[in-house]
Image (cartoon, rainbow, N blue to C red):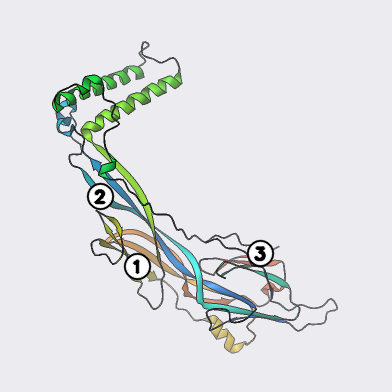
Amino acid sequence: MRAFVIILTLFLSLTACSSGQKVTQSGAVKQTTSTIPSHHGLWYYLPKTVVQVEMVAEKRVYKAGPFYRFSQRFLNVNDVITQDKEEWVIVDAKINTFGKADFSRLFSVTTSGQPAMAALNLSQEGVLLSINHPSNDINSNVDAKFPEEFISLKSVNFNDTPFSEEQLIKTSTTAMAEEVAKEIYKLRELRKNLLQGDLDLLPPDGIAYEKALADIDRLEKSYLQLFVGKKEVQRVSKFYDFMPERSASLESVLLRFSDLNGFLDGKDVSGTPVYIEIEIKNGEGQNLVEAEEVKDKSNRGLIYCQPATAVVKVIDRTLLLSSREVALAQFGQLLRLPADLLDSQNVGVVLNPSTGAIKQILLD
């Protein structure tokens, strides 16, 4: 999600006049019970973290060649495709995270007096990205287009094979297979002579030499596929978003998968389940902001998030496909920056757009 910059004026500090006289001023940041801003002013959200899983699978099509029965007889080849088949296979799972506005973590900013000026840099959803410094962070949310068509047995054929007239006039499949096998041996002999430097066969320059070898390889492959068959592979990715919540199970069916039909909805029992499991390593800590407010009612200082650490696993039935340690904002705790940190315009703060954690404190 592309963030845009909203420049807002935020008063955060106490400063003295040039005469040394104190000026009463304040900049308070307070969490609200509302989910949307209720009046004009300065507001920001902290993010909650979405786990995004990129499931990578291959559609594989196996097409038996018309001469597969003669592979051993004419070419002494046993490893051949003997039956037409289509299948789907999961080959990888990649785990990433991105942030969305956490509507339960809305903060209002109120100011008075003549504090130093700072700028709030917000995402399009209103998530705080940085203060007093431009943020170039881009959320890693990916929404790739899933292809509408896939390869199939109907799309795989041998129509591009360059048969010669001698091969085509054969009256039986056996005779035609034998003629094609002879052509394969001729091509191999020609390649051997070129590689050994037969002066009568060598092309006039290096480029023509490479092209001659490439043409021989192409012809041999085309003829050989008539015996060993064709295998076509189409690799595709599909993205699944999972929002870990305190009130929801952290072990769920992410999707179902079929070796015949590929990706299926999580409720389609015709496929086998692929699970997502999340284990919270730390979190559920004391809310230090609430504890602080009991002692200090000023509410000064920027509120940010210290995310929890979790291990995310993607499991195909019982096979572990991927595991990664991630940071989750919604299981972390809220903290305040020191109230006087942003008293100067020369101090900037950059937050992680996925977790709301402090990423950088910059001093100009």
Tell me: 119 left or right of 208.
Answer: right
- For the residues labelled 2 and 1, say whether their Cβ atoms are less than 8 Å apart: no
Q: Which amino acid, by three-letter code, is at mark 2?
A: Glu
Q: Quadrant of the C terminus?
A: bottom right
- For the residues labelled 3 and 1, say whether their Cβ atoms are less than 8 Å apart: no
Question: Which of label 3 and label 2 is nearer to you?
Answer: 2
**Which residue position holds label 2?**
87
Counting residues from the start of the chain, the first of labels 2 and 1 encountered is: 2
Evaluate whether residue 317 shows in this view: no
Q: Quick check: 23 above or below 363?
A: below
Q: Quadrant of residue 218?
A: top left
Counting residues from the start of the chain, the first of labels 3 and 2 encountered is: 2
**Which residue position holds label 1?**
277
Q: Mark 3 falls on what kind of element? A: loop
What is the x, y in percent for residue 277? 34, 67
Question: Which of label 2 and label 1 is nearer to you?
Answer: 2
